[in-house]
Image (cartoon, rainbow, N blue to C red):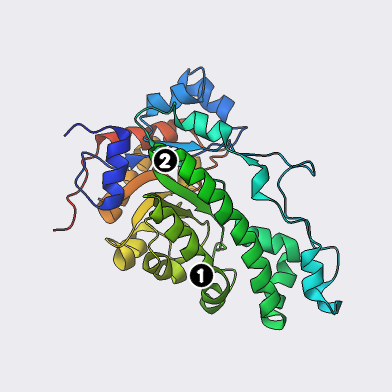
């Protein structure tokens, strides 16, 4: 079976038979690129991706061209708890306007990608944006003291992204394969909030984003660092197709736990530890880990680092071993 990268990843996410697991290098940190290019004797990013057999291309090129400056959600200037007319404070806030988003770069890049699986859309960090507006500690406190205000701010932030998505997805058409969005909900040991708070304040909007993307025929890849095992069932229930990046050393985010509880219900992308393994192990150990992760999480698996922003401390030889072993593996047969 000879597949293009685009066909391979689409089939993996749909749970269909393929030739091998998928592979994504991720999006290395800007300080890491010179190290990788020197090690692999490549002239540019695309040459390296081709050398490693990278199946995905993340298209990010949106520009926010407001007279007021770059896209941002600045902190509230007034203490919302000490203000009588809280809605007036929100009405006076400098909310970004989707009319100022220019998709020219993204659309141009999409049209020149080639037969690789294309992920993109404006990088949607609505949870972080709301936290930035209130301040993280105040945000969690206001969930209990002023739930209606938290929900109103979340609505206004989320509707900005929904509006930008609507325009971009329509313009991109069949050139885009998946909507890629991310919010880091976890720490190394647990969620930043209770599952009940997630259900009340965040899950409804994640479902809106997922439903919108599906309406345009797109798959949905959701990124969250940290230990989020307590809400993965919710992500599956709302239809998220693929979970990234599987922070392998966070509590209950290892391949064994994920396979035991969620295998067959969602596609996994990531899982190759960047905290210890890719930094300190030798290439043989990396190869063995890739094979083991595939046995546990395949066939719905895209091998990738457990954090896409590979740091300069990662051994390039281990990146090579991760890619090489992925290409040597045969994909497992899908269920049934």
Quarter of image, res 61: top right
- Alpha-carbon neighbours of circle 1 within 10 Å: few (<14), some, or many (≥20)? few
Quarter of image, res 75: bottom right
Sequence-earlier tag: 1 or 2: 2
Q: Residue at x 23, y 33 (%)?
A: 3
Query: How many numbered marks appear?
Result: 2
Q: Position of residue 14 (x, y in %)?
A: 27, 51
Instruction: Name the disc covering residue 226, or none.
Output: none
- Tell me the quarter of the image containing the N terminus: top left
Task: Check the image and report above or below for 315 versus 152.
Answer: above
| Tags 1 and 2 touching, CB below 8 Å | no
**In the displayed structure, does residue 119 sit left or right of residue 141?**
left
- Tell me the quarter of the image containing the C terminus: bottom left
- Alpha-carbon neighbours of circle 2 within 10 Å: few (<14), some, or many (≥20)? few
Q: Secondary structure at mark 1?
A: helix
Residue mark closest to the camera, 1 vs 2: 2
Q: Residue at x 49, y 59 (%)?
A: 209
Q: Nearer the viewer, residue 91 or 315?
A: 91
Measured in 3D between alpha carbons, the distance from the residue under mark 1 to the one under mark 2, in whole angstroms, is 26 Å
Instruction: Name the disc covering residue 204, or none.
Output: 1
Residue linked to disc 2? 173
Residue lying furthest bottom in this view? Answer: 145
Q: Position of residue 28 (x, y in %)?
A: 54, 36
Q: Nearer the viewer, residue 212 or 144?
A: 212
Q: Nearer the viewer, residue 230 or 86?
A: 86
Residue 111, can we see it?
yes
Q: Residue at x 86, y 67 (%)?
A: 78
């Amino acid at each position: 079976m000879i597949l293009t990268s685009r066909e391979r990843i689409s089939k993996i996410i749909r749970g269909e038979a393929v030739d091998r697991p998928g592979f994504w290098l991720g999006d290395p940190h800007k300080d890491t690129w010179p190290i990788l290019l020197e090690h692999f004797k490549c002239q540019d990013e695309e040459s390296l991706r081709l050398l490693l057999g990278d199946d995905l291309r993340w298209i990010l090129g949106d520009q926010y061209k407001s007279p007021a400056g770059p896209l941002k959600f600045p902190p509230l200037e007034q203490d919302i708890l000490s203000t009588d007319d809280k809605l007036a404070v929100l009405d006076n806030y400098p909310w970004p306007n989707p009319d100022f988003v220019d998709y020219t770069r993204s659309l141009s890049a999409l049209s020149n990608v080639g037969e690789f699986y294309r992920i993109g859309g404006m990088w949607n960090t609505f949870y972080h944006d709301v936290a930035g507006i209130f301040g993280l500690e105040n945000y969690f406190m206001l969930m209990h003291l002023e739930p209606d205000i938290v929900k109103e701010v979340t609505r206004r932030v989320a509707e900005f992204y929904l509006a930008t998505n609507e325009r971009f997805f329509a313009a991109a058409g069949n050139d885009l394969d998946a909507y890629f969005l991310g919010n880091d909900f976890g720490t190394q040991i647990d969620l930043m909030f209770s599952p009940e708070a997630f259900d009340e304040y965040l899950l409804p909007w994640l479902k809106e984003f997922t439903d919108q993307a599906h309406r345009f025929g797109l798959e949905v890849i959701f990124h969250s660092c940290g230990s989020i095992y307590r809400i993965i069932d919710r992500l599956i229930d709302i239809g998220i197709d693929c979970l990234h990046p599987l922070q392998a050393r966070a509590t209950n985010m290892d391949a064994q736990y994920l396979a035991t509880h969620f295998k067959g219900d969602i596609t996994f992308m990531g899982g190759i530890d960047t905290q210890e393994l890719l930094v300190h192990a030798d290439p043989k150990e990396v190869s063995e880990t890739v094979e083991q992760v595939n046995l546990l999480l395949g066939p719905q698996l895209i091998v990738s680092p457990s954090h896409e922003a590979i740091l300069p401390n990662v051994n390039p030889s281990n990146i090579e071993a991760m890619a090489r072993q992925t290409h040597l593996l045969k994909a497992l047969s899908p269920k049934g």
